Amino acid sequence: MSAESARLAALEDALARVEDPELHRPMMQLGMFKNLRLEGSVALLRVVLTTPACPLKDRIQGEIESAVIGRVDGVESVRLEWDSDVSRTRGVGGRQDVPGVRNIVAVSAGKGGVGKTTVAVNLAFALLRTGARVGLLDADIYGPNVPIMLGIDERPEAEDGRMVPHLKDGLKVVSIGTIIDPEKPVIWRGPMLAGALRQFLFEVNWGDLDYLVCDLPPGTGDVQLTLAQSIPLTGAVIVTTPQDVSLADVSRGIAMFQQLRVPILGVIENMSGFVCPHCGEVTDIFSRGGGRDLARSRELPFLGEIPLDPAVRVGGGAGRPLVLAQPESAQARIFQEVAAALAGQISQVNFAAEAEPEMPAGPRVRLG
């Protein structure tokens, strides 16, 4: 073996000890290190993450440097090329995959008025900003507010018999609010709701997506059941405000998803304190910490707290969500952190599912 081959073998041995901080498995074993090579005193490699939104890049880089520098003969520095290959939700027996869509995330709330749609829209743009391919399905049939928040009012076009999503700054969007008369109420029974939702899933040309974010109606009704029983959901995100009345309703929503064997990706506490734009004082208008406490008591991931900010309301009303309009603002950074935590949970859920035997579909619940 030549001296250079021996150095490369030593580099591989050193990197074999580096674990993914979320999956807790050797990154080499997971195929996350590519194109290992040495150029003089520099070790070079491509790191393929399970999501471009990974919040732990600095930690991974530090662990790679600690494993290699001073431990591989002659290596004084490391140069990384970051890449991603978003993990895919495994299919479930009796449920139909949406072609081209790797992960479908339901954003749910036990009751209305907690800012669920605002959270869903800003999370979608936060994921998009990481470089992921993202779609947004407005499945809140009774109150489709996504078109207002995104400034979309034209009807979608069709191509080869399939609906073409609206494109808003790179985000693919479908909402019944752009199809029905906005002045008329939707008075549909369960089977009609189920049929409309299936059309939005399977008769839309979504293309290739890493994440499809679904904004659900509040509660535990027909739309939630149809979605959970029709497709292999990656999981559900639960949005709540801190006060007791919201938390009580959220508990029922969590129980529904668990009964249907849909993973809970995490809890988000919205309207968590109001930061005065003039003095910076924080006022806990709706109390604070209830979402974190709920997640802890149910042993669920807590994805973060999102404070009240007038800019969120202004951006939504003007068709320019905060993460899109003010991406460098402190509030937008909070949404980015929550989105990164969510992406990490998706990777963990998918990895765990691959390691387990395939589970049958969850119990069927009659609609209507």
Image (cartoon, rainbow, N blue to C red):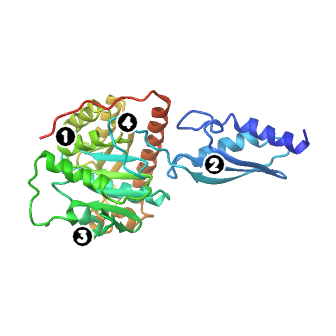
Q: Amino acid at mark 3?
A: Arg
Q: Nearer the viewer, residue 45 or 104?
A: 104
Specify the quadrant of the image occupied by residue 288.
top left
Residue 281 — which label? none
Going from the N terminus, do you reach mark 4 or mark 1 first? 4
How far apart are the alpha carbons under marks 3 and 1?
29 Å
Residue 220 — which label? 1
Horizontal arrangement in the rendering, residue 52 relative to residue 192 (left or right): right
* Residue 26 % position (x, y): 63, 34
- Tell me the SS state at disc 2: strand
Going from the N terminus, do you reach mark 3 or mark 2 first? 2
Going from the N terminus, do you reach mark 3 or mark 1 first? 3
Mark 3, residue position? 155
Q: Count neighbours of disc 3 (C-alpha within 10 A) and say few if under 14, some if 14 to 19, many if 20 or more.
A: some
Contact, mark 3 vs mark 1 (Cβ under 8 Å): no
Horizontal arrangement in the rendering, residue 230 relative to residue 234 (left or right): left
* Nearer to us: label 2 or label 4: 4
How far apart are the alpha carbons under marks 4 and 1?
22 Å
* Residue 181 % position (x, y): 13, 67
- Tell me the SS state at disc 1: loop
Horizontal arrangement in the rendering, residue 192 relative to residue 207 (left or right): left
How far apart are the alpha carbons under marks 3 and 2?
42 Å
How far apart are the alpha carbons under marks 3 and 4?
33 Å
Q: Amino acid at mark 4?
A: Val
* Nearer to us: label 3 or label 1: 3
Going from the N terminus, do you reach mark 3 or mark 4 first? 4
Number of labels in the image equals 4
* Residue 170 % position (x, y): 42, 66
How far apart are the alpha carbons under marks 2 and 1?
41 Å
